[in-house]
Image: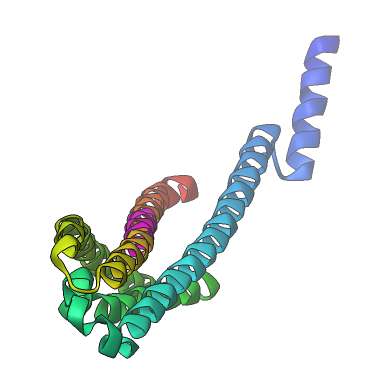
Amino acid sequence: MASRGDENAELEAASAGGTPASQVEPEVVNNSVYQSINGSQNQQKEKLQALGAVQILNGATILALGVFIGSSQSIFRPFRQFFLVFYTGYPLWGAVFFIVSGSLSVAAGRKPTRKLVEHNFGMNIASATIALVGFVFVSINLAVNKYSLKGCLSSQSLDLCICMGVLSNGIMSLMLILTLLELCINISVSAMWCAENKCNSREAISSPRNSV
């Protein structure tokens, strides 16, 4: 009899409070899940802004190298075989693509609207393609430099030819590193976008179940 009285008292207290203990625990779990989701989204925004800033710096550096080569054509013209990548236009249009994609990444990290994030994803895919093309151009330029330096032995200005070859190797090596870094960033940003879309789709599927 005493145990039945205790059970009745617990049921009356639960009904008076209006929220049984079995319903309180899921709410606590859901709150912790939402806090972790918000924290991960803030981290993704910060990463996106940081990656976008690096993209802008990469593009600005490649553009500066292209402008340097272009403004020194009066000196480099007799040795233009060392700077073939400049005649492809990659240091100009490639740098513009990288700067634009980096600016979109920074903007998407600050205000992640759906249209802006989609444009950022498309621009990063285009920049990744440009980076692959640029990698091929710069690699070919470095391979040509190897044979052009051997041809300096038959040149009238041997010292100047060697200096141009060494300068070209330095510029092309720096441009190759920046291009590979840009390619890695583009892949990382695209992977973040795909992962975020998967998380959003899972939330959309699970939200009706939670409401039920």
In depth, the one of 47 and 181 nearer the eye is: 181
Whether residue 99 is situated above or below residue 73 in the rendered picture? above
Q: How far across and how far down the image is residue 23, in percent? A: 63, 38
Whether residue 142 is situated above or below residue 68 in the rendered picture? above
Q: Is residue 138 magenta?
A: no
Residue at image location 48% in from the left, 66% down from the top = 54
- The dominant secondary structure in magenta is helix
Quarter of the picture containing the N terminus is top right
Residue 166 placement, left or right of 110? left
Residue at image location 73% in from the left, 39% down from the top = 15
Whether residue 2 is situated above or below residue 56 in the rendered picture? above
Q: Of all residues shown, which one is farthest toward the front?
A: 156
Residue at image location 24% in from the left, 73% down from the top = 157
Residue 184 placement, left or right of 137? right
Q: Is residue 178 magenta?
A: yes
Residue 199 placement, left or right of 46? left
Q: How many marks?
A: 0
Colour scheme in use: rainbow
In depth, the one of 115 and 146 nearer the eye is: 146
Q: Is residue 112 visible?
A: no
Residue 51 placement, left or right of 116? right
Q: Is residue 46 visible?
A: yes
Quarter of the rendering containing residue 19: top right
- The magenta-colored residue range is 175-189
